Image (cartoon, rainbow, N blue to C red):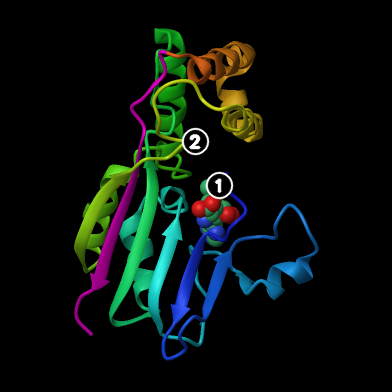
Amino acid sequence: MRGGGPGCRVCRSGSPGHWCGLERGTPARGPVQAFAERGVRNCDLRKLPDLSVLADGLWCSFAAAYFPDLSSALTSWGKHLRSSGWIALTEIDDLFGHEPLSERARSLLEGYAADAWAAGRYDFHMGHKLQDHLERAGFAVCKALTVEDQELSFDGPARPEVLEAWQARLDRMRLLHEFCGAEFEQIRTEFLGCLASPRHHSVAKVCCCFATKLGG
Ligand SMILES: C[S@@+](CC[C@H](N)C(=O)[O-])C[C@H]1O[C@@H](n2cnc3c(N)ncnc32)[C@H](O)[C@@H]1O
């Protein structure tokens, strides 16, 4: 299951194997001390502090969608990368893209995604935009691919632990609950039923992009 890892990691130049995680807030579980001991620094990726390091590489998994204006964020993160440093981004495209769903469920979920994008909170369609954002921010993309994912992009019925993870995810989505209002329980039940169905098909894709920083 995903979640719990830092939003981004930087791998420090000249120190093989050294990494530092960058994460906003504190983890839900465990004392704050353990957070720091794991090499994770508490900072907001929208305004990075001086990290006192020029990194060899930057790894960011399932956090890019929180930055709808990703090119600007990448430009700022890129300042902490050495010349020709690498960057690896992984993000979901169309998180709610699962079939079969009723027209009403589809319309509410798409409405919620559009609302999140308009408010600048989250881009549910970030996966397929990674390459464009990287190029606009001055990176040369060397590889772009989609990968299988047993939780986010798969066909056929979800395994029990995957269903549990989805149930927990939907329960955490307070704004989705507010957006759907009285229909939330029905949408939640239908969505989980869709994932559990032998006819289940994912339109959602997990996208990865590898790139290097251009220039000096
Ligand atoms: C979906 S989780 C992914 C966690 C982990 N990287 C993984 O792949 O399982 C998104 C992560 O991005 C972090 N995040 C979102 N916005 C952030 C921000 N402005 N600054 C730092 N971290 C942020 C969240 O705290 C959360 O840990």
The residue furthest right is 31
User: 167 and 51: which one is in front?
Assistant: 167
Tag on residue 48? none
Quarter of image, res 118: top left
Q: Report x, y in % for residue 51.
A: 51, 82
The prevailing secondary structure element of the residues shown in magenta is strand
| Badge 2 vs badge 1, beta-carbon distance below 8 Å | yes
Q: Report x, y in % for residue 180.
A: 56, 18
Q: Report x, y in % for residue 212.
A: 25, 71
Look at the image and give the residue range highlighted in magenta.
199-216
Q: Which residue is mark 2?
A: 151
User: 195 and 54: which one is in front?
Assistant: 195
Q: Tell me, yes or no, whether the highlighted magenta stretch contains residue 201.
A: yes
Location of ligand 1 given as a quarter of the image: bottom right
Q: Is residue 22 left or right of residue 143?
A: right
Q: Is mark 1 within 8 Å of ligand 1?
A: yes
Marked residue nearer the N-terminal end (2 or 1): 1
Q: What is the spatial separation of the Cα atoms under label 2 and label 1, in whole angstroms?
A: 9 Å
Q: Which residue is mark 1?
A: 2
Instruction: Kindly identify the residue that appears in the image at 29 percent across and 56 percent down.
Output: 209
